[in-house]
Amino acid sequence: MAKTLEDVKRVREIASELEQLGVPRKTTDKIRRWVKGEAKRMRDEGDEKLPFDTWKCHICGEERPDDKISVLSKPLVINGQPCGQQNIRYCNDRPACVEGAETFSFFK
């Protein structure tokens, strides 16, 4: 159980960092479910108000509501060998972000 808002925020940041490093989406989704559960628990207990209903788009950089962000998983290939995956968050209601996700890479 998280003790403070900062603890929960840091876990959320770690999930995003792990995703960028190619940790499988299934794993980072488990972490995000935990974060949402902790956020709900803290809200229900009146501890602190937590703004975990938004994500930052990797394409346009804007913070958007959870239902407006999707994730595209692409293989990470180094020297012709697949060695992980990139999980790219993008605005699913903005054509420029949808198209941009196709060519985006954290390693360009």
Image: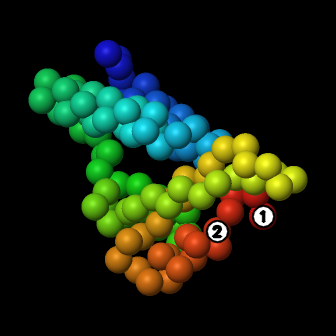
Relative to 76, residue 8 above or below: above
Task: Give the residue displayed 73% in from the left and 48% down from the top.
Answer: 82
- Judge the density around disc 1: few (<14), some (14-19), many (≥20) Cα neighbours within 10 Å: few
Look at the image and tell me whether residue 13 can be seen: no
Residue 49, x across and y down, in percent: 24, 38
Residue 68 position, x and y percent, is: 32, 66
Q: Are marks 1 and 2 in contact (CB under 8 Å)?
A: yes
What residue sits right under mark 2 in the picture?
104
Amino acid at the residue labelled 1 = Lys
Q: Amino acid at mark 2?
A: Phe
Residue 64 % position (x, y): 37, 64
Residue 30 got which mark?
Answer: none
Question: Which residue does the numbered mark 1 point to in the structure image?
Answer: 108
- Horizontal placement of 56 versus 18: left or right? left
Quarter of the image with the C terminus in it: bottom right
Looking at the rendering, which quadrant does residue 38 occupy? top left
| C-alpha distance separating marks 1 and 2 | 8 Å
Q: Nearer the viewer, residue 23 or 91?
A: 23
Q: Secondary structure at mark 2?
A: loop
